Image (cartoon, rainbow, N blue to C red):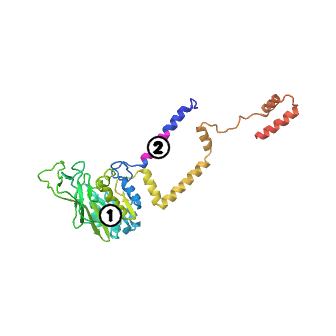
Amino acid sequence: MFSDRSYPRLLLLTLFVTVVATLLIAAGTSSASFGVYNSQWDGTAEVRTAAEAAGAQTTVVQNTSRYDRATPNETVAVVLSPTSTYDTRETEAVRSFVRGGGTLLVAEDYGAGGNELLSAVGAEARIDGTPLRDERQIGPSPAFPRADVVTNHTYTTTADELMLNHGSTVDPGSATVLATTSQYSYLDTNRNQELDNDEELMSRPVVTVESVGSGTVFVISDPSLFLNSMLDRSDNAAFLRAIVSAHETVLLDVSHTTALPPLVALRLLLQQSGLATFLGGCLSILALFALAKSPGVVSRIRTWRGQSPTATAPALSSEDVSAAVQRRHPDWDEERVTRVTDRLMKHRE
């Protein structure tokens, strides 16, 4: 089926296709913790899936200017463990969104980005930042404390218990506490993963809600609650569904987290920017036009496929054709042979 000379070419083609496919997969997926395009245990792709399943319009926000185009009283913005600080212009966009009636959910554990954003929008609740452990009401280990829902709220009607994963606690201020740990929980201040004499056992808040302007701010002391691997723990998934199903639009704010995969970032840019879409279309048309006008392109493609650039027979002179006609028809006279030869040469031309 294949000649000996075709096997190296087939092997090279297979290697090329494999490399390209690998690069495309790597460029279109994420391995970053809390990544909305990370489907592994430490990603949050299920948050995006749950929002879409609830019928909400889901937008991955790479720039806070997107808040200005949202309808606040129909939208919830989700910020999970921001790794950098929102500048003045960015915080003003989020602040205007909240005070205009939007819902903001900030989930943070040990970083400073969450508290800085809460302060900028005018919320009173703050994340403590000290590791929380529980010796009794736990999941796989004391680092997975279970929290009881203690306040009836729109988002907690279908959830009785939440499970954290190496989370912290919330200092509520004047905010309403929605969920607390058991009385056997403690803050591991020296982070030795043990209960010491100076570490107090007591119930502690982990989820709060408060009004800011015309909007609402939720604070959760553990973004891991929304990890793909944690949504099947306790009532975490029900809590998430209640949040997204209560809104027509869900903004997944990744503007201050790990960068998106290149192909995803490009697709979102084309979707959210009319100018980028126009420029991309123009460049595509120009590339196709240049390819069509490039001399020898078809010939090179045929050569690469193992075909000759021209499929015509080798050129023959009139004497060669005349000799061939005489051999084929020895009984013809010279005049007839000449006439047929001339006709064949004109036909070839």
Q: Residue at x 60, y 38 (%)?
A: 303
Binning the other alpha carbons within 10 Å of mark 1 as few (below 14), some (14 to 19) or many (20 upward) gives: many
**Would residue 56 be counted in the magenta stretch?**
no
- Inter-mark Cα distance, 2 to 1: 38 Å
Q: Is residue 102 above or below residue 21?
A: below
Residue 309: image location, x then y, percent:
64, 39
Q: Which mark is residue 104?
A: 1
Q: Residue at x 40, y 58 (%)?
A: 53
The quarter of the image holding the N terminus is top right
Majority secondary structure of magenta residues: helix
Q: Is residue 188 above or below residue 99?
A: above
Binning the other alpha carbons within 10 Å of mark 2 as few (below 14), some (14 to 19) or many (20 upward) gives: few
Q: Which mark is residue 21?
A: 2
The quarter of the image holding the C terminus is top right
**Occupied quadrant, residue 177:** bottom left
Q: Residue at x 36, y 66 (%)?
A: 93
**Occupied quadrant, residue 285:** bottom right
Q: What SS does tag 2 mark?
A: helix
Q: What SS does tag 1 mark?
A: strand
The stretch of residues the image draws in magenta is 16-26
Q: Is residue 225 visible?
A: yes
Residue 16: image location, x then y, percent:
49, 39
Residue 74: image location, x then y, percent:
38, 67
**Occupied quadrant, residue 174:** bottom left
Q: Amino acid at mark 2?
A: Ala
